[in-house]
Structure formats: structure tokens, C-alpha cells
Amino acid sequence: MQSGYYMKKIILLFVLITCAWGLFAQSGLFNLSYAMTFAEADSVLNAQGFFAKDSGKDLVRYYPKDNKLTSAIITFLEPKSQRIIGWFIKFEPSNSEDYDKIVIKTISDMHGEKNHFDEDTEQLIWFLSTTRTVHVMYADDGGLTVLYFDSFFQDLFDLKQTETLAPEAKE
């Protein structure tokens, strides 16, 4: 009878550890994850054909070498640990509506069908945890944008720097 008790305890512990790990390393578009080191994120994005350019305070901008669907990706970094606290993806305004639907479907597949549409800001929002959210909306130029945000680090997200993603920055 004792062995059954300990087996249940071990299984419960394993489930809790798995759930905790899932919250810690939530992954999203372009295989980026919260709490990923900058070196890991840089490697992942380089392997997908992006190059770093125009770094700012606590963020690094990436531009595609050959990807005609994505304008840029910005990674936001926690200054002390240099770990990813969020990322912003700007897709090309020339992308079709069907492509935008594929992006939204991919996000739904990753983060669940349950989301919230904020009518005031016209954005879809997925709540990943008490502080982490995914925001999908259209930019002024008509391009789809996706923001992986962590409100715990709200002051480190300089979203004004996302507005200056110049196409001429591409190599």
C-alpha cells in the first residue's frame, strides 16, 4: 500500500514539474521562448535567415535575408540576465489576407483557441499567464503585427522603437 502512495506522489510531482517548465519556457512564433538566453535566440533567428542590426537599449532588431513575408523581429531583453522577456514581429503589409489567417491559426494552434478581441484597440489577445500575453493587430501600414509581451517587465518594452522598422534596413 505504501508503494502506491509513493508512486502517486512521484507522478503528481512529475506533472507539476512539467507544467512549471511549460510556463517557464513558453514558446511562440519563430521558435522563440520567454526566458531564452539572448545567445539562444540569436542562434535560432540566424538559423531561420535573420540577421541582427540596429540594436537599441535592451532590444535587438532582426531583419530577414530572404524572407519576403516578414519585415522584422525585435527581441526585448531583461538587462541583467540578457534573457528574452518578449518579442515583436512585423509582417509585410503586402501579405495576403490568407497568409494573415495562417499566422493567426498558427498562434491559435500554439496557444489555444481561447482569446479575447479588444474592440477599443482592435487586437486579438491570448492570455498565456498572469503576466504574459500575445497581441495580434494591424499596423498603420496594414501589416500584421504580433507582440509577445510580459507585463512584469512593462517598463522595458519600448514599443515606439517598433514603429521605425525601416524596410531599407534589409541587406
Image (cartoon, rainbow, N blue to C red):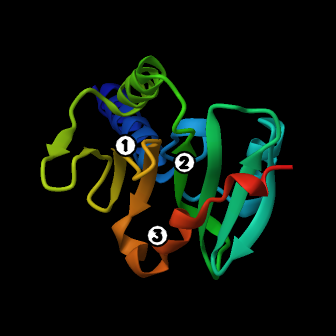
Q: CA distance from mark 3 to mark 2?
A: 12 Å
Position of 69 with respect to 163 (left or right) is right
Tag on residue 89?
Answer: 2
Which element is circle 2 on?
strand
**In-front residue for pair 99/29:** 99
> Viewer-proximal residue, 90 or 26?
90
Query: Between 48 and 38, which is closer to the camera in this rendering?
Result: 48
> Residue 15: x percent and y percent?
38, 35
Give the tally of numbered discs.
Answer: 3
Coordinates of residue 18 in the picture (x, y in percent)? 45, 39
Q: Which mark is residue 126?
A: none
Q: Quadrant of residue 74?
A: bottom right
Q: CA distance from mark 1 to mark 2?
A: 32 Å
Pointers 3 and 2 in contact (C-beta within 8 Å): no
Find residue 12 and report its image quarter.
top left
First in residue order: circle 1 vs circle 2: 1
Q: Secondary structure at mark 1?
A: helix
Q: Which residue is mark 3?
A: 159
